[in-house]
Amino acid sequence: MNVACKIQAVGVRKEYEVSRKGGDRILALDGVDLEVHAGEFLAILGPSGCGKSTFLNIAAGLERSSAGEIRIDGQHVEGPGPDRAMCFQDHVLFPWKTVWENVEFGLRVRGLGRKERAAIVAHYLGLVGLSKFANQYPHELSGGMRQRCALARTFALDAATLLMDEPFASVDAQTRNILQEEILRIWDQGAGPRKTVVYVTHSIEEAVFLADRVAVMTARPGRVLGVFDVPLYRPRNDETRSDSFFRDLVVHLWKVIRDQVERIS
């Protein structure tokens, strides 16, 4: 395996049984082959139901593939591990814990000492602009602030690989743009080498804005139709969105995905 390859999917297939009698089955993924380079930000696009989230869950070790495998650092994924952190569509914060306690939770589970936990939590709450809200509870925060808390919790774990399943899908368009810039800033400012990020989204604009490369999946059963480079300069900001190459790539990817959507209808 190429030394620059962090994640390698080989022939990943996932089939679900939808009948209790074992008759009807749905093929969600059928032979997904994909490589993710160490330290890159890879976005995954595709029509609804193509298996994007299923693929991410298999990479996280939350589901098992029916055939094929995903390897991370050359090791077969058999279950969740400390080398990976998952960020879901919903913030999944503990409602009875404060912002501080939510970010600290994973660090407690890992057995870090109190002073080390405090330094890490303070650092990431500062990065996402929630230092003044450390003692607030999730219900006291806006949707965007809750997602900021979820980002802080994810990055605080310091996992080498971040798996993100449409983390900004539930916030308004303005907040979403701001959070996109936030995630790139945190990703770029982290200690040591950049994290490897696999980011599932329905938004073509979001994929192009965030990613180094964009993988487009076919309609179900999902396969990788193609992987497209995004040679836009970093750091990215509002000016990036008005770049002619940005717009051209968004239009091109929409044409590719529209063809897959039309196959469903």
Image (cartoon, rainbow, N blue to C red):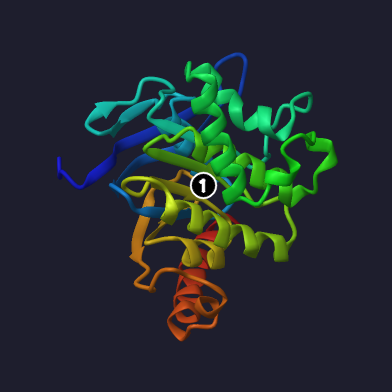
Circle 1 sits in a helix, a strand or a loop, which is it?
Answer: loop
Left or right: 159 in relation to 2: right
Q: Residue furthest bottom?
A: 244
Q: Nearer the viewer, residue 58 or 245?
A: 245
Q: Position of residue 134 (x, y in %)?
A: 72, 38
Residue at the image position 34 percent from the left and 60 percent from the top: 227
Residue at the image position 55 percent from the left and 25 percent from the top: 106
Report the quarter where the C terminus lies: bottom right
Q: Position of residue 60 (x, y in %)?
A: 44, 31
Q: Is residue 3 above or below residue 251?
A: above
* Residue 58: quarter of image: top left
Residue 31 appears in the rendering: yes
Residue 217 appears in the rendering: no
* Residue 228: quarter of image: bottom left
Left or right: 250 in relation to 35: right
Q: Residue furthest front?
A: 115
**How many neighbours does mark 1 have within 10 angstroms: few (below 14), some (14-19), or many (20 or more)?**
many
Q: Position of residue 179 (x, y in %)?
A: 62, 57
Identified by mark 1, the residue type is: Cys
Left or right: 201 in relation to 9: right
Residue bearing the label numbered 1: 50
Report the quarter where the N terminus lies: top left
Number of residue marks: 1
Q: Residue furthest right?
A: 140
Q: Position of residue 114 (x, y in %)?
A: 55, 21
Residue at the image position 48 percent from the left and 70 percent from the top: 236
Residue at the image position 28 percent from the left and 40 percent from the top: 8
